[in-house]
Image: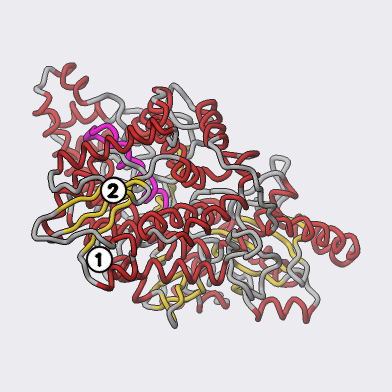
Amino acid sequence: MAADEAVPKHTNRLVHEKSPYLLQHAHNPVDWYPWGEEALARAVAEDKPIFVSIGYSTCHWCHVMEHESFENEEIAALMNQWFVCIKVDREERPDLDEIYMAAVQAMTGQGGWPMSVFLTPDRKPFFGGTYFPPEDRFGRPGFPTVLRRMHELWTEERSRVEEAADQMTASLAVLGRLESSADAFDLTPVDGAYAQIVAAFDPVDGGFGGAPKFPRADYGSLCLRVYRRTGDEKALRTALETLDHMAAGGIYDQLGGGFARYSVDQEWLVPHFEKMLYDNAQLAFHYLEAYQLTGDEEYARVVREIFDYVLRDMTDPRGGFYSAEDADSEGVEGKFYVWSEDEIREVLDDQQFAAFSRVYGVSREGNFEGSNILHRAMSPPEAAAELGVDPELLESRLAESRRLLFERREHRVRPGRDDKVLAAWNGLMIHALARGAVVLDEPRYLEAARRAADFVLDEMRQDGQLLRRWRGGKAGIPAYAEDHAMVVAGLLELYQAGFELEYFAAALRIHRQMMEHFVDENDGALYNTRAGESDLLVRVKTGYDGSVPTANSVAAYNMLSLYELTGEAVYLQQLEKLLRAFQARLQQQPLAMVRMLLALDAYLGERTELVLAGPLAETLPLLREARSGYHPDLFISYAPGDPESLSLIPSLEGKESGAEAIAYVCRGFACRRPTGDPSEMRAQLALRRAEAGASGAD
């Protein structure tokens, strides 16, 4: 390539942005703007409609539409002539994404990314869709056809466009309205959600519904809670069989660990190959729950491999966690992950290949476009019996084969990585790592959680206020409610794993800031954005959990945690007000906010406080014993006996701190006889559960 050919022909305003997604479009011939005052003011000044394209860096169809349309000189000329064109990274601006996704879904009955939406100069949506091909085909209008039609409507039927935009904007206003209920709380929404989950369960392949099939960690968590409360074996099977099938499927990276975003088929075989931090954080925590309940080492193995993947491939040297990895490498979806039979034979000897090919479903014809997506087609014990090999020897061969293939794969061109650090998603991974450090007795997970928390607290705050995104040494974008809620959740779990008071203090500060800037004092629910955000069409309170749970759902459990840890009634009052705001939604659409149902279940059910005292190092066996069982609503604190701890956690008052480690098992802040014996503490935890069931609180 000649030197002058290496210079991009076009450069637009996105070249100055931090978002990897926006930077991907910085050399399109489209005159892209980032969302902001400059673009919005130009639309008003020139009386032009706005075209907004919303996506994210690891979105496959976003790449397709860019290549087909946004890199096309003729299509770009139409866009530049008739519209002010704005690119939005949905991961940086979830507030904009939610508003305009709601509009597109109302207009078309469906949504997705890339999202394409046309606005009046005052930001009101009047037409939208998702991916548009570069020409008319398969009954779908091509993007040039859409552009011409929108221009015609704007210039020739302006009043009709503005009327439709006004109507859509009025309908979007309901996204900020809730009606609180005064009805008594009960488990009806939890039981209703469970019934719908079981009805959607796939008894053959696990998971819920048909293709495409998404991981639903919160569904499984709810099932485990129902099993614990009722003993319903169907609830247990629903959760565990889903975890088993997912871990065996192609959706799971059998060599490098970590889950892909979703499976395009019903069997979990063919993934959409992108990997998201938030999926792996939530799934790691759910596999931990399954391990706590069953003691099955397979669940622990999956958790360790997820964490190894994140710490190896998704961690910035400063400690924060990156956002995602792309589905594509060298322009081909899944190329990094799939194998031909010959490629595997080149790496493994005959004995290794014989075992590996049976267990991981390798064949000459392949299972994906002539190649093999590795999956557990046969269990190792079955393969050992078929091959007449000692099971331990076969496991050793498989482990060595995975190592060799992983090392060979590392020489391939990797998928693109979105290396921005998002506060909310880091909160989710801190939450999982901190719990995993105790459950799996693995100090390096705790250290990774600490480093990430320190990174967020040190690098992602300005004037004491949390920021949304960090990349390339610079943080920016005021944090949303979800950032506050998820960071608080991570910090509270981190405190309960290592008892460092600084993390609890930070959680309190960030929670209070969230309540100051985001809460609606009328109903107690959280807006997504802080008051005074002037560039938004409407202010939204999210009432459904998507691929990440809503701020309201996460905050609900945080409020309960803060109440149980401190004993301060204000947090219980916040929780009850928040639950009342969403009570009608939970009754009518229980699957809309399953994470909030976990908080409701805990609020109405069995909760236990555990206070540890004595020399910190000597309390660790007690802590590990407490986390070795499945106690989903066990809240743990440490009483060092100093004034600062008592000021932050008043419930520690009276808990003696002597020369030996000691545990106080409490319910409703009334404690049983303190003990330093892990076995007796375990018995007291079990007795607390029995007492709760006998009293009807369970």
**Marks 1,2: beta carbons within 8 A:** no
Residue 483 pos. (x, y %): 47, 64
Q: CA distance from mark 1 to mark 2?
A: 23 Å
**Which residue does the image show at 40% across and 67% down from the upper left?**
508
Tell me which colouring the rendered structure shows.
secondary structure
Residue 498 pos. (x, y %): 23, 60
Q: Amino acid at mark 1?
A: Glu
Q: Is residue 496 visible?
A: yes
Quadrant for the N terminus, please. bottom left
Q: Amino acid at mark 2?
A: Cys
**Which residue does the image show at 66% across and 67% down from the upper left?**
76
Q: Is residue 421 above or below residue 437?
A: below
**Which residue does the image show at 81% across and 61% down from the upper left?**
165
Quadrant for the C terminus, please. top left
Residue 222 pos. (x, y %): 45, 37
Circle 1: element type: loop
Quarter assignment of residue 231: top left
Residue 500's disc is 1
Q: Is residue 213 left or right of residue 664?
A: right
Q: Label 1: few (<14), some or many (≥20) within 10 Å?
A: some
Q: Is residue 440 left or right of residue 414?
A: left
- Residue at the disc numbered 2: 671
**Which residue does the image show at 41% across and 76% down from the upper left?**
461
- Report the magenta residues as a range: 278-298
Residue 212 belongs to magenta span: no
Q: Label 2: few (<14), some or many (≥20) within 10 Å?
A: some
